[in-house]
Amino acid sequence: SLLLAVCASASLTGFAAARDVTIGYLGLENDPRYQPDVVYTRLEIAPGGNPVVAARMGIEDLQMVTDAVDLKVKLDEQTGADAATLATKVKAMADAGENFIIVDLPGDVLDQVAAQTKDLPVTLVNATAPDDLLRNRCYPNLIHTAASDRMDADAMVQYLRTRNWTKVLIL
Protein backbone atom coordinates (compact mmCIF):
# COMPACT_ATOMS: atom_id res chain seq x y z
CA SER A 1 0.00 0.00 0.00
CA LEU A 2 2.94 2.33 0.63
CA LEU A 3 4.21 1.76 -2.90
CA LEU A 4 0.76 2.39 -4.34
CA ALA A 5 0.57 5.68 -2.44
CA VAL A 6 4.00 6.69 -3.71
CA CYS A 7 3.02 5.93 -7.30
CA ALA A 8 -0.25 7.83 -6.94
CA SER A 9 1.61 10.76 -5.43
CA ALA A 10 4.18 10.63 -8.21
CA SER A 11 1.54 10.70 -10.93
CA LEU A 12 -0.35 13.56 -9.29
CA THR A 13 2.69 15.73 -8.60
CA GLY A 14 4.22 15.57 -12.04
CA PHE A 15 6.81 12.86 -11.60
CA ALA A 16 4.92 10.82 -14.14
CA ALA A 17 6.04 13.22 -16.85
CA ALA A 18 9.38 11.48 -16.72
CA ARG A 19 7.54 8.12 -16.63
CA ASP A 20 10.10 6.79 -14.16
CA VAL A 21 9.82 6.69 -10.39
CA THR A 22 12.65 5.40 -8.28
CA ILE A 23 11.96 4.46 -4.71
CA GLY A 24 14.97 4.14 -2.45
CA TYR A 25 15.55 1.37 0.05
CA LEU A 26 18.16 1.81 2.76
CA GLY A 27 19.39 -0.98 5.00
CA LEU A 28 22.25 -1.79 7.34
CA GLU A 29 24.97 -4.15 6.13
CA ASN A 30 25.06 -7.34 8.21
CA ASP A 31 22.08 -6.16 10.24
CA PRO A 32 22.11 -8.20 13.47
CA ARG A 33 18.30 -8.12 13.58
CA TYR A 34 18.20 -10.58 10.69
CA GLN A 35 20.60 -13.19 12.03
CA PRO A 36 18.87 -16.58 12.39
CA ASP A 37 18.97 -16.68 16.19
CA VAL A 38 16.59 -19.11 17.80
CA VAL A 39 16.16 -19.66 21.52
CA TYR A 40 15.79 -23.07 23.04
CA THR A 41 11.98 -23.07 22.67
CA ARG A 42 12.37 -22.55 18.92
CA LEU A 43 10.88 -19.08 19.10
CA GLU A 44 12.51 -16.57 16.81
CA ILE A 45 13.96 -13.63 18.71
CA ALA A 46 14.59 -11.56 15.59
CA PRO A 47 12.23 -10.41 12.81
CA GLY A 48 11.34 -13.09 10.29
CA GLY A 49 12.96 -11.58 7.24
CA ASN A 50 14.33 -8.53 5.54
CA PRO A 51 11.54 -6.19 4.35
CA VAL A 52 13.34 -5.46 1.06
CA VAL A 53 11.66 -8.64 -0.19
CA ALA A 54 8.26 -7.07 0.54
CA ALA A 55 9.28 -3.88 -1.28
CA ARG A 56 10.25 -5.90 -4.35
CA MET A 57 6.98 -7.82 -4.17
CA GLY A 58 5.01 -4.56 -3.87
CA ILE A 59 6.58 -3.23 -7.04
CA GLU A 60 5.82 -6.49 -8.85
CA ASP A 61 2.21 -6.35 -7.61
CA LEU A 62 1.86 -2.83 -8.99
CA GLN A 63 3.02 -3.92 -12.44
CA MET A 64 -0.46 -3.95 -13.97
CA VAL A 65 -1.32 -0.50 -12.59
CA THR A 66 2.00 1.08 -13.53
CA ASP A 67 1.84 -0.40 -17.02
CA ALA A 68 -1.65 1.05 -17.47
CA VAL A 69 -0.45 4.58 -16.70
CA ASP A 70 2.86 4.12 -18.54
CA LEU A 71 4.90 4.48 -15.37
CA LYS A 72 8.04 2.56 -14.52
CA VAL A 73 8.80 2.01 -10.82
CA LYS A 74 12.27 0.96 -9.79
CA LEU A 75 13.73 0.10 -6.39
CA ASP A 76 17.19 1.48 -5.60
CA GLU A 77 18.54 -0.82 -2.88
CA GLN A 78 21.40 0.66 -0.86
CA THR A 79 23.16 -0.52 2.27
CA GLY A 80 25.82 0.94 4.50
CA ALA A 81 27.90 -0.09 7.48
CA ASP A 82 27.28 2.95 9.71
CA ALA A 83 25.15 6.07 10.09
CA ALA A 84 27.61 8.38 8.32
CA THR A 85 27.79 6.14 5.26
CA LEU A 86 24.01 5.75 5.22
CA ALA A 87 23.47 9.54 5.46
CA THR A 88 25.82 10.00 2.51
CA LYS A 89 23.80 7.45 0.54
CA VAL A 90 20.56 9.27 1.38
CA LYS A 91 22.08 12.50 0.05
CA ALA A 92 23.14 10.73 -3.17
CA MET A 93 19.67 9.22 -3.54
CA ALA A 94 18.05 12.63 -3.03
CA ASP A 95 20.43 14.16 -5.57
CA ALA A 96 19.39 11.44 -8.04
CA GLY A 97 15.76 12.52 -7.67
CA GLU A 98 14.50 9.88 -5.26
CA ASN A 99 11.85 11.50 -3.10
CA PHE A 100 10.86 8.48 -1.00
CA ILE A 101 13.27 6.13 0.76
CA ILE A 102 12.08 3.08 2.68
CA VAL A 103 14.39 2.81 5.68
CA ASP A 104 15.08 -0.50 7.43
CA LEU A 105 17.46 0.45 10.23
CA PRO A 106 17.74 -0.09 13.97
CA GLY A 107 16.35 2.84 15.94
CA ASP A 108 19.67 4.30 17.07
CA VAL A 109 21.09 4.29 13.54
CA LEU A 110 17.88 5.69 12.05
CA ASP A 111 17.94 8.50 14.63
CA GLN A 112 21.41 9.54 13.45
CA VAL A 113 20.57 9.24 9.74
CA ALA A 114 17.35 11.25 10.11
CA ALA A 115 19.17 13.97 12.06
CA GLN A 116 21.90 14.25 9.40
CA THR A 117 19.44 14.35 6.50
CA LYS A 118 16.56 16.39 7.95
CA ASP A 119 17.15 19.28 5.54
CA LEU A 120 17.12 17.17 2.37
CA PRO A 121 14.07 17.12 0.08
CA VAL A 122 13.39 13.45 0.73
CA THR A 123 10.88 11.50 2.82
CA LEU A 124 12.31 8.68 4.90
CA VAL A 125 9.76 5.94 5.55
CA ASN A 126 10.59 4.04 8.74
CA ALA A 127 9.62 0.45 8.01
CA THR A 128 10.89 -1.38 11.08
CA ALA A 129 12.18 0.71 14.01
CA PRO A 130 9.60 0.72 16.85
CA ASP A 131 11.54 3.09 19.12
CA ASP A 132 9.37 5.71 20.85
CA LEU A 133 12.34 8.10 20.77
CA LEU A 134 11.99 8.43 17.00
CA ARG A 135 8.40 9.58 17.32
CA ASN A 136 9.35 12.11 20.00
CA ARG A 137 12.12 13.65 17.87
CA CYS A 138 9.63 14.72 15.18
CA TYR A 139 12.06 14.83 12.27
CA PRO A 140 10.35 16.67 9.40
CA ASN A 141 11.48 14.11 6.83
CA LEU A 142 10.63 10.90 8.73
CA ILE A 143 7.31 9.07 8.74
CA HIS A 144 6.54 5.74 10.40
CA THR A 145 4.62 2.75 9.02
CA ALA A 146 4.91 0.32 11.91
CA ALA A 147 3.58 0.58 15.43
CA SER A 148 5.86 2.01 18.09
CA ASP A 149 6.69 0.18 21.31
CA ARG A 150 4.20 2.41 23.14
CA MET A 151 1.46 1.62 20.61
CA ASP A 152 2.09 -2.13 20.95
CA ALA A 153 1.97 -1.91 24.75
CA ASP A 154 -1.25 0.11 24.62
CA ALA A 155 -2.88 -2.40 22.27
CA MET A 156 -1.88 -5.27 24.57
CA VAL A 157 -3.35 -3.54 27.63
CA GLN A 158 -6.57 -2.72 25.78
CA TYR A 159 -6.91 -6.33 24.66
CA LEU A 160 -6.27 -7.65 28.17
CA ARG A 161 -8.83 -5.22 29.58
CA THR A 162 -11.53 -6.25 27.09
CA ARG A 163 -10.98 -9.84 28.21
CA ASN A 164 -11.25 -8.69 31.87
CA TRP A 165 -7.79 -10.05 32.57
CA THR A 166 -6.67 -7.68 35.31
CA LYS A 167 -3.95 -9.88 36.81
CA VAL A 168 -1.41 -10.60 34.10
CA LEU A 169 2.21 -11.65 34.05
CA ILE A 170 3.98 -10.95 30.77
CA LEU A 171 7.37 -12.56 30.29
Image (cartoon, rainbow, N blue to C red):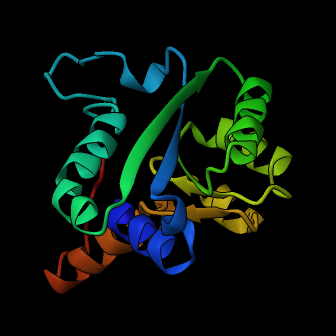
Find residue 156 and report its horizontal and vertical position in percent: 30, 68
* Residue at 57% in and 37% down: 106
Quadrant occupied by the C terminus: top left
Q: Who is closer to the viewer here, 104 or 158?
A: 104
Depth order, front residue of 130/110: 110
Is residue 153 at least partly visible in the picture?
no
Above or below residue 33? Residue 141 is below
Q: Residue at x 58, y 65 (%)?
A: 143
Asked whether the viewer can see residue 16, the reply is: yes
* Left or right, 118 with reference to 18: right
Residue 123: x and y, percent?
A: 64, 60
Quarter where residue 124 is shown: bottom right
In the depicted structure, whether residue 49 falls above or below residue 60: above
Where is residue 119 shown, x and y percent of the image? 86, 58
- Residue that appears at 18% across and 28% down: 43
Q: Quadrant of the N terminus?
A: bottom left
Would residue 106 be found to the left or right of residue 42 on screen? right
Q: Give the vertical position of 9 relative to 51 (above or below).
A: below
Q: Is residue 3 above or below residue 156?
A: above
Q: Is residue 41 left or right of residue 127?
A: left
